[in-house]
Image (cartoon, coloured by chain):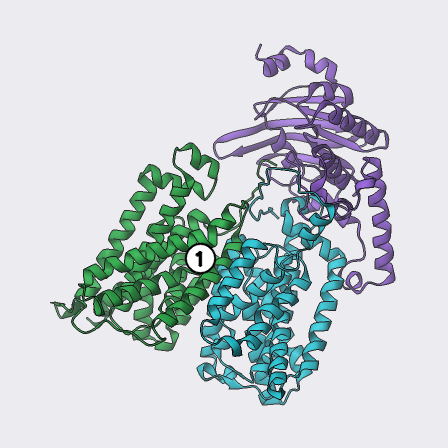
Amino acid sequence: MGQQLTLLISAAEFALAGAVLALSTYMTLWAGLLSFATVSFAAVGAFFATHLMNSAGLGLWPALLVGGLGGGVVAAVTGLLLIRLAGHWLALATVALILVTRVVVVNLGGLTGGSQGEVVPVEVHLWQLIVVLGVACLILARLARSRFGTAAVATREDPTVAATMGIPVRRVQAVAFVISGVLGGVGGVLQAGLLRYIDPDSFYIDLAVTVIACVVLGGAYHWFGSVIGAVVFTGLPVYVNQFIGQGQAIIDGALLLIIMIWLPGGLVDPLRWRRLRDGRRPAPTPDKRREPAEVNS
Amino acid sequence: MSGTEALAVDGLAKRFGGLSVLRSVSLTVPRDTVFGIAGPNGAGKTTLLNIISGLLPADGGSIRLYGDACHHLPAQALARLGVSRTFQNIRLLRGLTVVEQVLAGTYRRRRVGGLRGSAGTPRARAELRDLREQALETLESVGLRDAADRLAETLSYGDQRRLEIARALVSRPRLLLLDEPTAGMNAADWTGIGELVTGLRESGTTIVVVEHNMRLIQAICDRVAVLASGEVIACDEPGVCLRRPEVRKAYFGK
Amino acid sequence: MLFVQQLINGLALGAVYALFAVGFGVVFSTMRILNLAQGVYATWGAIFAYWAVAHAGLPFAVACLVGTAIGAVAAVAVDQVAFQPLRSRGGEQLLGTIITSVALWISLREAASLATGAAPLGFPPGTVPGGLIRFAGLRVLATQVIAVVCAIAVTAVIHVILRHTRLGAAIRAVGHDRGAAMLGGVNPRVAILTAAALAGAATGLAGVFYADGQTFTFGLGDGLLLQGFAAVVIGGMGDVRGAAFGGFAIGVVQVLSAQYISNSFQDAITFGLLLVVLVVRPRGLLKTVELGRA
């Protein structure tokens, strides 16, 4: 029984940290940017904060602050370069960013422990994770009702129309990217505190895949979807692993595939609910969704 | 001279690759009038509207909005100067209800942004409540108030057009651009749109409308410019314009 | 002399990347799918080729064909399972196809791990052409020559199919406008399956060549995916020749930087180059005004 409880708590902890990272990715999708850069921001936050924990004896809260700051600064810089890229090119560029980040981490041995990695001296507890995620959710819920929220949705759905409504599309995307950076950095510190040991592979493609899967699985059209997705996709495996063992990834993959095909909007899908509520299928408009279109600014 | 002109387009040119879509188009739209732009398919009407609303850069010529040069500005800056538009193929935002679509159109009128807006201060709430009220009033004016909380995509085609106009109107534009507001509509629907436009002019909105439907143009426009092959071939009151031989030739090929 | 020798080694490695990149580029440019499952085609191609040689006793040339065929089959299967359901839904499905490709990636990777017992595999000695060509003090392995020749040949064949046949025109059109593809008289479904099969075949062959000189594991495709991805971006996606060039370029850069700079900088240079190209090279990368018929 005690062991089950430990496992459950561990699953919950990873789910909560995963949720913060998923919210970081959600931020960019909100403004119509498909970005994998969350993992890079997390790496920056985690290694930066861990270095300061080790060298300056930083505690968890200042470390989170520092991590978020680091992620935000990196997001601001990379955002300047990358946001002008069109939809699928941005996705490619952010994958590249993850690869480059790992290389940088490996080669900055003095700060990051290089390929050996380094021990994280500060432990993260469940209640701290709950507090951080709670604050993050509160901020996103507020943002959703603010002027920014409206602008982000319009930018995502149709940047051309958004521009004709006076919405500064690029600026909205840049703000979303920076907030994503801050959340990513914070999530990285949390992840580090859970792992207690980080190396260059702690923040690599597989984490990127998990995070984006959480967001899409949970529902990419509402921030709460990211939280649900993280519970299902990062928390559940930690717990269920004991029963399955080998072949776990096959089940993960099948789950992901089934959800994408049968529930394309994810588990939390406000649009589907609204359609159900209105009790009518959309008028049969030839829904030619435009490419993530763009505007000259 | 800028006293009475809402929009002055002078010598506007645009080419796509080797194709000259607009060659030296000039026209002036007086304040508080409805100005029609007509012409056969491919005449450059929509391109002209895209340039005026800042979605496309012009290759030459100038545009003045209430006397201020604005042909170098992007769409969002023009929107802030009071240019608002609809699209030929209705472009509503997916997933939003009718009133949310209109609220999105109030973006440039929202003052409480950034941190204060996100913090949900009383001022931010009051502003949002106020704008929602205005959105509902605008919906009332196009006859959609009862549908306010429905998903926009469930509206009929004609109602989606009205909704798009409401979204453009709620920002209180100084210049409203309508791109074929009756495309694909039946007679009952388009006469309704005609009445709506006439009502708007009376309440003091300057409107430029691209339209195919000559009967509608005659009914609602004070002046109409006829474009053919990227040039203005006639610009006058609708009744006069349509009797011109060059206009009849462009339209009916005789 | 060492430089020329390493240049040759780089080209041989680059041939593998080129084969992979050509497949990746075809799928990305015609179907707009960022296919992260591409790497496992190579893994499975290599595993089947290994089985053909080590267990069935077939000659290496046949093993290459087996690997190629498996790659094509895997690609078609993945397309039908992961992409077709989204495609039939219509609209832009970039995010959806990324997720379903991830689903197939992790599933097929795990399947490969189970199939091989997660143990390293290696082609038994003597089964891979071991010939050594000595020329002016240079040593060139027969397999290196085979890889380079195959990479060039496959690129040429796919290029000709895409650019100079009606089927190829349909494949290119399908990514942009399915209606137009119909008008050409070619069934879009046939065009899509052909593109997937071509891409898979090239990738499967890349897997065999990647595996033939060393021991490999079920993770073979992951490394190839990253390098091939870099190659495609650097070389350009619109044209398979660009992708092939990118592959060769990365192979050469990797081998030379390992020789003259440092082993640990190998990836730094490749991926740094990748990011710089993505950010700096404006041609084809920057957003364009897209208004539809607004």
Decide: is C167 above or below A272. Answer: above
Image quadrant occupied by the C terminus of chain C: top right
Decide: is C174 above or below A152. Answer: above
Q: Which three-letter amino acid code belongs to the residue tagged 1?
A: Asn
* Letter of the chain in purple: B
* Letter of the chain in green: C
The percent coordinates of residue B226 (x first, y second) are 65, 21
Horizontally, is B153 left or right of C59 in the view?
right
The quadrant holding residue B254 is top right
Residue at 49% of width from left, 60% of height from top?
A93
One can see residue C114 in this view: yes
The percent coordinates of residue A226 (x first, y second) are 64, 65
Residue at 51% of width from left, 67% of height from top?
A252
The percent coordinates of residue A274 (x first, y second) are 71, 50
What color was chain A assigned in the picture? Answer: cyan
Horizontally, is B176 left or right of C9 in the view?
right
The quadrant holding residue B21 is top right
User: Of B209 and C99, which appears nearest the observer?
Assistant: C99
Residue topped by disc 1 = C35
Element under label 1? Answer: loop
